[in-house]
Amino acid sequence: MSVHTEPNRHSSRHDREIVEARVIVTCPGRNFVTLKIVTRSGIYGLGDATLNGRELAVAAYLQDHVVPNLIGRDAGRIEDLWQFLYRGAYWRRGPVTMTAIAAVDVALWDILGKMAGMPLYQLLGGRSREGALVYAHANGRDIAEASDEVGMYLERGFLAVRAQCGVPGVKKAYGISTPGKPYEPAESELPAETVWNTPRYLETAPRLFEQLRADHGNAVELLHDVHHRLTPIEAARLARDLEPYRLFWLEDATPAEHQAAFELIRQHSVTPLAVGEVFNSIWDCKHLIERQLIDYIRTTIVHGGGITHIRRLADFAGLHQVRTGFHGATDLSPVTMGAALHFDTWVPNFGIQEYMFHGEEILAVFPHDYAFRAGRLHVGDTPGHGVDIDEALAAKYPYTPKQLPVARLEDGGMWDW
Ligand code: KDG
Ligand code: MG
């Protein structure tokens, strides 16, 4: 990738003054919102501000309420700006606010790295590992197809794979791609309505993992996402039924607004649990972590207030032997992937990183220096987080409204998607 700035080791308050902040919305196959903060020195930083299906809410929050507060401020005062945007809004937390704060925070860390001439992982405290273990997504309309996909990822060098398969009697189960296309849930302008069947799913999921172990042995790490579909007692039953197949984790087994609900799952099973891609703050998982009700925390940089807040969350998790397992679906832009990988390279209590690949058009809009080798993603040594944006190319892809699906039960009642 082209390095767009010369490191400036002697930046002054004058050099660091924020002179411009632009919100860039682009849709190279899917929508992304990016914040670009420019300093008087010409050095700029990028932060991802994408909230799937609610992109323009964050863009407006940034444009109308955050950008006017940035101009003239010192880009080096990362902590103070974080506190200003969090406490100063009066209305704390929530996905829109915390995604907007994250975009500013990541852009400022990017600027700091460029000014110091250092990659982000170095600013955080340096390398703890050579590369970040990642998991890919295998899915299939049935068990056999999902197993073939797992095999394909193993051939490509993956050491960990998430597996989802179709559920008999369920027309569009979570995680299953339209044939010939990579999986992308936000497919239509208004939410697609899907119908869910818990008993059929509870029969199918253990059979999937029984087959995967039979076909691929025990060396591969296997993961599964329930995507909030079960009640706590149903989740406990599934976690128990999956024990023989030794999952790396079972994700979002039940909605976690009520954190104590996970106590029931823990009472019945030793299957490791992951949760938190929809969380925005340490307060969303305080009980889950303190009571050791989970093993992996999935809240990542873009939806959790940026590096400044996620670093606190990860330290708190580390005290309770909970490891990180950052969300990394395609709706998180390469800017988040770059920042997350630097974090993963440093964080002592790293577990795993989700890696759902972006298409070629997206990668062309966001030149980056991370690369996959032998089951792990490796960051480069470009100063900052190592991800840029080609604004001219981004401008060729106008925003296209797309929302996530919803789920109903067979009687028409709303369920969790
Ligand atoms: O925007 C929602 C997606 O990121 C989510 O459905 C993907 O659950 C997901 C995962 O684990 O990647
Ligand atoms: Mg998930």
Image (cartoon, helix red, strand yellow):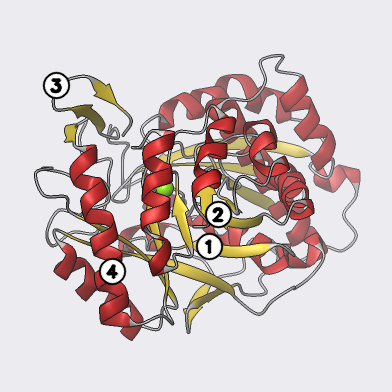
Pointer 2 with pointer 3, Cβ within 8 A:
no
Pointer 2 with pointer 4, Cβ within 8 A:
no
Residue marked by disc 2: 326
Residue marked by disc 1: 353
Residue marked by disc 4: 210
Location of residue 26 (image quadrant)? top left
Local packing at callout 3 (Cα closer than 10 Å; few below 14, some 14-19, many 20+) is few
Q: CA distance from mark 2 to mark 3?
A: 35 Å
Left or right of residue 85: residue 367: left
| Residue mark closest to the camera, 4 vs 1 | 4
Q: CA distance from mark 1 to mark 3?
A: 37 Å
N-terminal-most mark, 2 or 4 = 4
Label 2: state its secondary structure.
strand
Label 4: state its secondary structure.
helix
N-terminal-most mark, 1 or 3 = 1
Local packing at callout 1 (Cα closer than 10 Å; few below 14, some 14-19, many 20+) is many
Q: Residue flagged by tag 1: what amino acid is it?
A: Gln
Q: CA distance from mark 3 to mark 4?
A: 31 Å
Residue marked by disc 3: 411
Q: Residue flagged by tag 3: what amino acid is it?
A: Asp
| Residue mark closest to the camera, 2 vs 3 | 3
Local packing at callout 4 (Cα closer than 10 Å; few below 14, some 14-19, many 20+) is some
